[in-house]
Amino acid sequence: MQIGIVGKPNVGKSTFFSAATMASVEIANYPFTTIAANRGVGYVRASCPCRELGVKCNPRNSGCINGTRMIPVELLDVAGLVPDAWQGKGLGNQFLDDLRQADALINVIDVSGSTNIEGVPGKPGDHDPREDVMFLAKEIEMWIKNILENGFSKMARTAKMTGAKPEEILHERLAGLKMTEAQIKAAVKEVDPPSDPMKWDENILLALSKKIREASKPLIVAMNKADIAPPGNGDLVRTIAKEAVPTMAETELALKKAEAAGIIDYVQGDKSFSIKEGAKLNDAQRKALEYMNKNMERYSGTGVQECLEKAAFNTLDLIVVYPVEDETHYTDHSGSVLPDAFLIPRGSTAKDMAYKVHTDLGDKFIRAVNAKTKRTVGADYVLQDGDVIRIVANK
């Protein structure tokens, strides 16, 4: 799974990315600091079955901290987007191409309103942050529409002659953007365009692009710089955003650095932190930490971890499943207990899980075993969040 970190320049995208991954990227106060896309790994949290099952786990593809499994997700920090990026303005073409494989997008905005639509710094309250949400969605939708329009007339004529369904021709045109035919079919159903694609005009293509974007590249808004935002700005953003989380990326990054330096006790996603006994701090450092703690109490944390988890579990509706090879001891072939945690779409079946682990397991699937209940289940068993599953396949 890949989550794109997007937004206009100078809103704290790269700081958010660094805070989520602790990767070293260039962070500065001017537009287009990020030129090439930065890739890194963040983590989402889930309850590890180790405590429920009374075992000590040996995670391989993830970590476990006091019964909380830390599951990796790929994050992509791309160049800042400016108005008319879909036409190539700024680094628009590169930005949009980088997002082709993203499953969901976190739109980092400056909720304080201290940067204008081009990303030029100003003072808190100078800019309406709602514009940042609306323009970014529009840019992606115009990008999709532009791809559809390129050569669409020829495809529409061919579809009319062959009787191809609308979702088939759209899926062919959008190949490579990680958009499923099911997502496109749902968009077509909602827009309900004429059955003859030759009659589709610009407005229909734009409406289809909007619905396809909503289904295949859903957006969650990170209302960054929440600690300096004028009162009410967050409420304004929520009037137009389905998911909007107050975030303080600079605080999260500072806390992780302080924790790494042995100054504080803090685990990502915690709502507070504590200064370690004996930590040597000057007055300025102590006041800075007090300021951070006060804002974290106000917002129940820094919001960075919450954004990742809302993207994975709310927006994409993923669940966590643990495949094993021995349902009695919950181990793999090497004896590691609960070695892997997989993020899969809710509604996935045991056979879907087999393919997720390895193509051969899916092709040679016989049955599965629910390790918690020790019951044998079939290929169409719908997996539940937290399931521990053994796949039985032909050798």
Image (cartoon, rainbow, N blue to C red):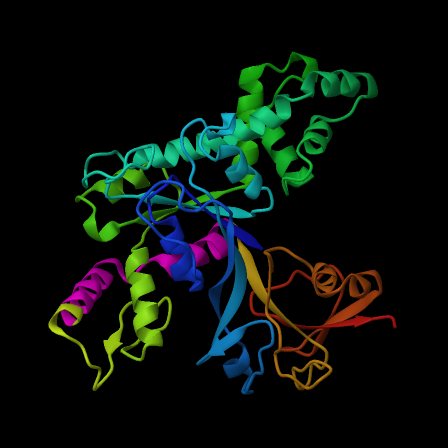
Considering every residue shown, the one lying at the far right of the view is 395
Tell me the quadrant of the picture where the N terminus can be found: bottom right
Apparent side of residue 245 relative to residue 59 in the rendered image (left or right):
left
Q: Position of residue 392 (x, y in %)?
A: 79, 72
Apparent side of residue 63 relative to residue 181 in the rendered image (left or right):
left
Answer yes or no: is residue 195 visible: no
In this rendering, is residue 261 above or below 30? below
Considering every residue shown, the one lying at the far left of the view is 283
In this rendering, is residue 280 above or below 194? below
Tell me the quadrant of the picture where the C terminus can be found: bottom right
Apparent side of residue 278 relative to residue 283 in the rendered image (left or right):
right
Q: Position of residue 26 (x, y in %)?
A: 40, 54
Residue 91 is one of the magenta-drawn residues: no
Q: Main secondary structure of the magenta part?
A: helix
Magenta residues, as a range?
286-315
The residue nearer to you, when weighing 353 against 288, is: 288
Residue at 23% across, 43% down: 112
Residue 288 is one of the magenta-drawn residues: yes
Image quadrant where residue 212 sits: top right
Q: Position of residue 51 (x, y in %)?
A: 50, 82
Answer yes or no: is residue 318 visible: yes
How many marks on residues? 0
Residue at 79% across, 66% down: 361
In this rendering, is residue 296 above or below 186? below
Image quadrant where residue 332 sits: bottom right
The residue nearer to you, when weighing 35 against 286, is: 35
Q: Position of residue 255 (x, y in %)?
A: 30, 68
The residue nearer to you, when weighing 81 against 310, is: 81
